[in-house]
Amino acid sequence: MTPKTTLTAVIAAALAATTGLVAAPALADHHKEMKAEPNIVQVAMSTGVHNTLVAAVKAAGLVETLSGPGPFTVFAPTDTAFAKLPEGTVATLVKPENKGTLTTILTYHAVAGKVTAADLVALIKQHGGTATLTTVSGGKLKARLSGDKIVITDAAGGTTAVTQADVMTSNGVVHVTDGVFLPG
């Protein structure tokens, strides 16, 4: 490895360690030895804080869809976000007999197309402070700004903050959230 390549690897490792996510492959364009940009599922699997989401995506049979070309925008709740749900909720949802409900909840976290944080902020401003997003499940999410954070309100009235925006993937973008959206 050249000194420049080593520095790039160190920077990428530092970014991954501080964000808990796969380093954005902007550096990969300059270095062929780095892997291609991961897809949404690969990113979720690599973070160490989205294990519940990954298990739910697998139980719902959505791995192939969310690994496909998309593009999708996924609001990805962390394990801590899932832990805020009433005890037993996740265990019940991942049972085979609840696959339909689980699929509805998970697709309520996805929007067709690639919507970056800047796009979302522009929509919020364009629509007088609140933007409405239609999810893949057909549900609605309301996005607004609270200070410098994007806050999402679900159909049940719950509010969730985007804690990390714009994790770019090969098939869209992921925004990490501190809560789970409920379709109502």
Image: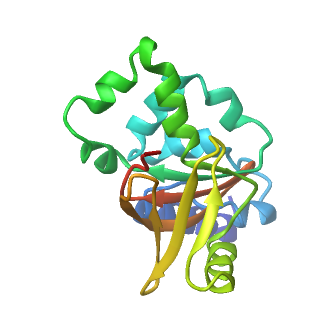
Residue 94 position within the rendered picture, expressed as x and y whole percent measured from the top left: 40, 22
Q: Residue at x 47, y 45 (%)?
A: 183
Q: From the viewer's perspective, is 57 left or right of 177?
A: right
Q: From the viewer's perspective, is 51 left or right of 12?
A: left
Colour scheme shown: rainbow
Q: From the viewer's perspective, is 101 left or right of 62?
A: left
The picture quadrant where one finds residue 131 is: bottom right
Residue 129 position within the rendered picture, expressed as x and y whole percent measured from the top left: 56, 83
Q: Residue at x 32, y 31 (%)?
A: 90
Exactly how many numbered labels are in the figure? 0
Task: Name, please, the residue furthest toward the left.
Answer: 87
Q: Residue at x 61, y 28 (%)?
A: 62
Residue 12 position within the rendered picture, expressed as x and y whole percent measured from the top left: 57, 63
User: Looking at the rendering, in which quadrant would you find the N terminus?
Assistant: bottom right
User: Looking at the rendering, in which quadrant would you find the C terminus?
Assistant: top left
> Which residue occupies the foreground of this view, 89 or 61?
89
Picture layout, residue 19 above or below residue 110? below
Picture layout, residue 76 above or below residue 55? below
Q: Residue at x 30, y 24 (%)?
A: 91
Picture layout, residue 54 above or below residue 155? above
The picture quadrant where one finds residue 41 is: top right
Q: From where the camera sits, is residue 34 visible?
A: no
Residue 163 position within the rendered picture, expressed as x and y whole percent measured from the top left: 42, 67
Q: From where the camera sits, is residue 114 visible?
A: yes
Q: From the viewer's perspective, is 56 left or right of 118?
A: left
Task: Name, please, the residue furthest toward the top.
Answer: 97
> Which residue occupies the foreground of this view, 167 or 37?
167
